[in-house]
Image (spheres, helix red, strand yellow):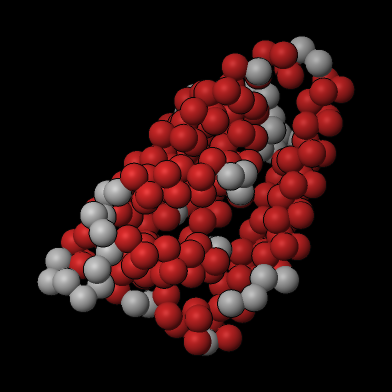
């Protein structure tokens, strides 16, 4: 099968468009901090895919599949981080603080948070472990190169879609800022969503 097939691109877009931790994080940042910060969040979430993609390509993702301890350690670190993100949304001057900060250090911190959200999700490594080989002849001499191309394409699509999500969130920012009750409800919704994702990850199996 041709690596960059229509099937791969279509499947990737479906997976990327589905709401997950990265999507909700980017939306929250876009609402709270504006478009530029949402781009930083998008870059961070995309960069967080790199370890999972590389692990699947060189076979390290198999460790999560065979080692219960390794999977559980990463999983509960991810759960703890998602709960931290939920608390960070609810607290004053947290993630959904509407005072936009254009400090480069703030953008860097936003990107790091996005990276950690994906790095601390063992299910992402298992996803790539199962996903990429479907579109590559693993017995061919250039299988590794093909998988790198697929992973890079998936990351590019992720970045583009997440920037789009962030832009949409940023466009509604003024509406939210001018309605404190709406902002409070948005905080509860996003915090509850991260809490739900943490619970779902806690009960995830290999």
Residue 67 drawn at (x, y percent): 52, 87
Quarter occupied by residue 159: top left
Residue beneath the point at 51% across and 49% down: 15
Return the residue nearer the eye: 44 or 11: 11
Residue beneath the point at 27% across and 64% down: 136
Give above or below for 204 relative to 153: below
Count the marks. Answer: 0
Residue 12 drawn at (x, y percent): 43, 48
Give above or below for 123 relative to 3: below
Residue 184 visible in image: yes
Residue 85 drawn at (x, y percent): 67, 49
The quadrant in which the N terminus is found is: bottom left
Tell me if 27 is positioned left or right of 190 in this view. left
Residue 154 visible in image: no
Residue 50 drawn at (x, y percent): 37, 57
Tell me if 31 is positioned left or right of 91 in this view. left
Return the residue nearer the eye: 43 or 23: 23
């Amino acid at each position: 099968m041709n690596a960059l097939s229509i099937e791969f691109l279509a499947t990737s877009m479906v997976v990327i468009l589905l709401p997950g931790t990265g999507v909700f994080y980017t939306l929250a940042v876009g609402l709270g901090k504006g478009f530029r910060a949402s781009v930083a969040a998008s870059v961070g979430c995309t960069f967080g895919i790199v370890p999972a993609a590389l692990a699947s390509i060189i076979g390290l993702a198999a460790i999560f599949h065979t080692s219960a301890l390794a999977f559980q350690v990463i999983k509960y670190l991810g759960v703890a981080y998602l709960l931290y993100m939920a608390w960070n949304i609810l607290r004053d001057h947290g993630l959904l603080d509407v005072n936009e900060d254009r400090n480069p250090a703030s953008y860097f911190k936003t990107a790091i948070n996005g990276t950690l959200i994906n790095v601390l999700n063992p299910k992402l490594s298992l996803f790539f472990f199962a996903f990429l080989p479907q579109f590559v002849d693993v017995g061919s001499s250039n299988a590794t190169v093909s998988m790198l191309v697929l992973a890079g394409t998936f990351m590019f699509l992720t970045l583009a879609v997440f920037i789009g999500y962030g832009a949409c969130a940023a466009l509604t920012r003024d509406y939210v800022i001018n309605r404190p009750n709406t902002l409070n409800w948005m905080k509860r919704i996003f915090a509850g969503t991260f809490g739900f994702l943490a619970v779902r990850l806690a009960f995830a199996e290999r």
